[in-house]
Every structure is written in structure tokens, then in C-alpha cells.
Image: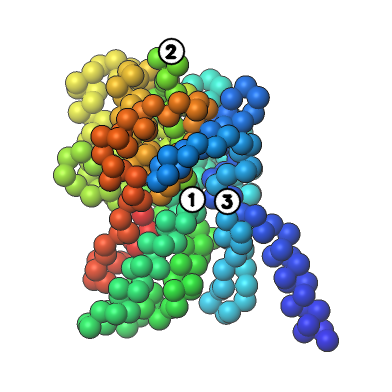
Amino acid sequence: MNSQNSSSNQRRKLGRKRKNHFNPQLILSSFTTPDGLLYRLDKKSGTILKGKPKSFGWERDFYNYTQDDQERASIEDDLTALEGKVDPIIKSICKTHMTVSLSADAWATVDQFVVAQMLRTPRAKDNLANVAAKIRNSPKPPPRGSPAWLLSQTTKSESASAVFQIIKEKLAIVAGGLRDKSRFLLLAQAEGATFYTSDRPVALRNQHGGGTALVCLGVEIYLPLSQHIVLAYCCPTLCRLAVEHSPDFGAFVAKGAAIPVTLSDIVSLNELQVRNCTRYVFSSSNSFDIALNLLRADPSASDPPPLREVRSGDITGIEDACP
């Protein structure tokens, strides 16, 4: 009887938060119209919906998973705590368009939040489960005890849930990959032009032929914080080249002030959100002209990004399998 009561209590505990948002409300609420609503474009069907931020970017029981000891757990409370810490920081950034007052601890919190946004998406779970399946089916098993071997011992559900183990246990370590990056803000000032966000909001690119892992030379990382502000990271080498090319860029970065960007920059960053997302793009406007123009010009942009191709020998840590 006690065991049954315990199981029932555990189910009730997990059932308190069955609607799990992978798009944080603190971010989506900064992409709303004056009446507190936002628009969602389905890039596959072209359908546009309007609704409250809480209506979008969630899956039932998304954060519930099975631990190594087979006990059920959830990272909802951990993410809620992180959002509570970062919320006033992001609100300050969006209000002042400045980062100069942020302490090292505040930046560490922001960095962890950015990495959490990379990992807390359905695509991240799919990536890890896909990599684990390929390792399991490989004719040459990985070395016993290695991260790849540990993945090979999991079921599809368990390997997908490993993403949440990373968030719970290794988030600060993984976020350390952002510590040496140059950070700056981008400001949309062009009349009527705003930034998008999406169901996979942290967008990475490398325009210099390299990879898009956090440690790669030439990597650029973008997280829209509001319809007017994007938080950007790049490797120090890129930042130095940008300063040499534009002293004004260096002056803005030195002051911690948001850098006004051109309409073409806004188009480029919004197209990156469209290509990077799994299916849904969010905006404060229902026009979605940039997205629709891209989808007409390149129909392949309506597909989700391909699942990550990783050989078992390439995985030095479980987090390496995550996008």
C-alpha cells in the first residue's frame, strides 16, 4: 500500500506541470503585439496563427525522463529556477540596450540560459536519439566506458532523455564554451523591421568553412531576446577582424552598447531563424515577408535541419551529440 501511495504521489508530483514549454515565456512575451499576442508561422504549411505566448512552444510531459536509477524525474523546476535568475538580466538588457553593467556572475547565468535553449528543444532530443541509434547499429562498437559506449547502452527514450541529464548535471560545464567568446548586442532600428524567433531559437552558423560547435573557429551564435534585440557571440578572432574592418563596431562592443544593424542584416538573421527552426517561426507581425520570400526562393528551407551526423569516434562527451 505504501508503495502504491508513493507511486501515486510521484505521478501527482510529475503531473503538476504536464504542459512543458521549450520556448520560455519570458522570451516569447518580448515578441508580442501591444495587446500581448504573437504570430506563429508554420514554415511547412504556410499557416499563420495568432495567440498568447503560453499557447505556443510546448509539449506534454516534455521534461519528464527516466534517471539512471530508473526513477522518474523532471527538469521543469531546474529550468524555472534558471529562468527566474536570468529574467531580470534579460529585461535590463532589452530595456537599456546595454550590457556594460553585467557582472561575471550575471554573464555566467546568461551563458547557461543560452546553452539551455540549445538543448531544451525537441530537435536536440531527436539528435541525441539518432546518434545513439547509429552507434548501436555500428559494426564496430565504441570503447567500453566511453561516452559513445554509454549512449549505445540506452534505449531510444533513454538516449533522448540524456539531454536533460546534461542540462541538470553539466550545464555550467557546457556553457563554459561561451566564456571566451566575444559577446555583443544587435539592435533593429529600421522602421517596421523586427527580429524573428523560433522553436529552435539559438541559431549557429559558420561563414568560414568551419563547424558550428561552440569551440569551432569562426562560429557565430545568435539568440533573439526580443523583437528588437539579438544577443550574439562569436570567436575572438572574428571580433578582431570586425573591429579592424569597422572601428565603430569596436566602439559599441567596448561600451557594451547595442549595435544598430541594417535592414539587410535583419533579413539575414531572420532567414537564419527560418532555416534553423524545426517548424515554427514567431514574430510580432503577421506579414512574415522575409520568411515567405525565402521559402518561395528556396523550398528546401521549409524542411527541418538534418539530424546531426556524428561517428561514434567523434563523441568525446555526451554533449557533443547535441546541436
The image's mark for residue 191 is 2
Q: Residues within 10 Å of mark 3 (few under 14, many from 20)?
A: some
Left or right: 291, with 199 as reference point? left
Q: Position of residue 16 (x, y in %)?
A: 73, 59
The mark lying in front, picked from 1 and 2, is: 2
Q: Are marks 2 and 3 in contact (CB under 8 Å)?
A: no
Residue under label 3: 58
Quadrant including the C terminus: bottom left
Nearest to the observer: residue 200 or residue 259: 200
Please name the residue shown 26% across and 64% down the image. Answer: 310
Q: Are marks 1 and 2 in contact (CB under 8 Å)?
A: no
Q: Amino acid at mark 3?
A: Trp
* Secondary-structure class at tag 2: loop
Residue under label 1: 116
Q: Position of residue 176 (x, y in %)?
A: 40, 50
Mark 3 or mark 1: name the one nearer the start of the chain.
3
